[in-house]
C-alpha cells in the first residue's frame, strides 16, 4: 500500500519534475549535472531500442524465409539483444563512473587547498643567476 501511495505521489508531482528537468537542461552555467539523473531513463530507452531492432531484424528474416526468420527470432535475435543491452549498460556505468570521479576529484581539490593554505611555502630550486649573485657578494 505504501509503495502505491509513493508511486501515486510521484505521478502527481511530475509537472514539477518536468519543470526541474527543463531548468537543468537549459542551465547554461552547468551548476547541476543532469546526465547522472538521466541514466535510468537512457537505459530503458536502450532496452526498448534493442528490442525494436531485434523485432525488425526477425521480421526481415521472415521476409526472406521461414527458416531464416525462426533462426533470427530464436537464436540470433536474443543474443544480439543481450549484447546490445550489455554494451549500453557498460557504457552508462562508465559514464556514471566518470561523473563520480569528477565529483570526488573536485572534493579532493577543495581539501588540498584547505590543507595547503596553512603550510609555509618551500622553494625547491633557485635559479643559477641568483645563486651566482649571492656568491659574489
Image (cartoon, grey):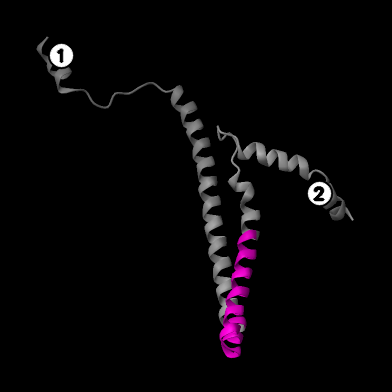
Main SS of the magenta part reads helix
Task: Categorize mark 1 by other alpha carbons within 10 Å: few (<14), some (14-19), many (20+).
Answer: few
As helix, strand or loop, the secondary structure at mark 1 comes to helix
User: In the picture provided, is 78 more to the left or to the right than 5?
Assistant: left
Residue at the extreme front: 63
Residue 8 is labelled as none
Q: Nearer the viewer, residue 115 or 78?
A: 78
Q: Is residue 59 magenta?
A: yes
Residue 14 x/y as whole percent: 77, 45
Residue 66 x/y as whole percent: 61, 89
Quarter of the image with the C terminus in it? top left
Residue 134 is labelled as 1
Q: Nearer the viewer, residue 12 or 117?
A: 12
Residue at the extreme bottom: 67
> Do callouts 1 and 2 mark residues in contact (Cβ within 8 Å)?
no
Q: Nearer the viewer, mark 1 or mark 2?
A: 2
Q: Which residues are magenta?
A: 45-73
Q: Residue at x 57, y 76 (%)?
A: 57
Q: Residue at x 15, y 14 (%)?
A: 134
Q: Is residue 111 magenta?
A: no
Q: What's the CA distance linking mark 1 and mark 2?
A: 76 Å
Residue 16 x/y as whole percent: 76, 39
Quarter of the image with the N terminus in it? bottom right
As helix, strand or loop, the secondary structure at mark 2 comes to helix
**Residue 103: which quarter of the image?**
top right
**Residue 70: which quarter of the image?**
bottom right
Whether 130 is drawn above or below 101: the answer is above
Tell me the residue that label 2 is attached to: 11
Amino acid at each position: 500500500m505504501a509503495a502505491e501511495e509513493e508511486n501515486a505521489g510521484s505521478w502527481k508531482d511530475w509537472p514539477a519534475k518536468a519543470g526541474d528537468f527543463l531548468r537543468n537542461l537549459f542551465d547554461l552555467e552547468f551548476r547541476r549535472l543532469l546526465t547522472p539523473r538521466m541514466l535510468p531513463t537512457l537505459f530503458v530507452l536502450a532496452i526498448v531500442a534493442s528490442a525494436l531492432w531485434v523485432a525488425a531484424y526477425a521480421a526481415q528474416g521472415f521476409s526472406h524465409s521461414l527458416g531464416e526468420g525462426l533462426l533470427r527470432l530464436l537464436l540470433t535475435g536474443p543474443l544480439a539483444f543481450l549484447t546490445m543491452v550489455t554494451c549500453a549498460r557498460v557504457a552508462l556505468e562508465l559514464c556514471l563512473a566518470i561523473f563520480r570521479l569528477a565529483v570526488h576529484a573536485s572534493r579532493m581539490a577543495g581539501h588540498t587547498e584547505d590543507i595547503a593554505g596553512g603550510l609555509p611555502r618551500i622553494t625547491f630550486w633557485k635559479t643559477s643567476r641568483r645563486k651566482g649573485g649571492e656568491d659574489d657578494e
